Image (cartoon, rainbow, N blue to C red):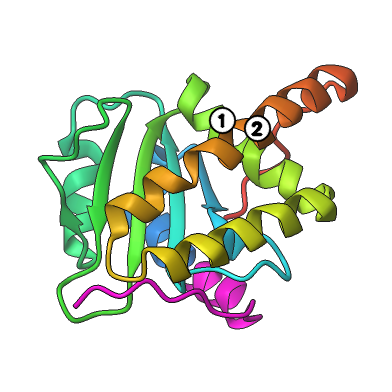
Amino acid sequence: MNEIIIEEYSYKWPQMFEQIAEEIRRGLGDVAIRIDHIGSTSIQDLAAKPIIDIQISVNSLEPLELFKQPLEELGYVYRENNPEKTKRYFREQPGNKRIHIHVRKFGSWHQQFALLFRDYLRTHSFEATLYEREKIRLSELYRDNRIAYVEGKNKIFWEIIYRADRWAGRTGWEPGESDA
């Protein structure tokens, strides 16, 4: 069973990211322009599924081998059938702790989008609380249906990203330094 469990925030999550990111940085070197902790585990005090999401920003998604081979040597599995064409997706080896690696083109809309959403929630605790409450509600409603859970988050996600975009325009937001 692939039950959806939302856990209280853990200060171990950023530490786990740092360890993983250090290995990735050694493995990829300058191929990785940025390595960032994204997703709910990157937002302090936000309850989340205990999955570390990492975004690696590269100059180009081709040739794939520039990052595929080093990531596979580190033990990550390339998900060739990922339907999202704006990224290359890797996961942990079966049986290991869940890690999602999203490789995106540096400066692309989707690369910026993930950082904006994260930074907005990091600086707007009220919005993070709204997001957390909805995730908990949906995890209880769709405990065994990951697709329905993910699709259920779309409404609040797009409401928040709309406000995040307006905030970015007012403040001149730009991504800060890479996390690793």
Q: Amino acid at mark 1?
A: Phe
Q: Is residue 72 left or right of residue 145?
A: left
Residue 30 visible here: yes
Could you tell me which residue is drawn at 35 percent across and 40 percent down?
Answer: 103
Q: Which residue is mark 2?
A: 159
Q: Is 43 rendered above or below residue 123?
A: below
Q: Which mark is residue 154?
A: none
- Give the residue at the far front of this rendering: 141
Residue 174 visible here: no
Could you tell me which residue is drawn at 16 percent across and 38 percent down?
Answer: 65
Most foreground residue, 40 or 34: 40
Quadrant position of the C terminus in the picture = bottom right
Q: Position of residue 85 (x, y in %)?
A: 25, 26
* Quarter where residue 77 is shown: bottom left
Q: Amino acid at mark 2?
A: Glu
Q: Per the image, is 50 magenta? A: no
Magenta-tinted stretch: 1-20
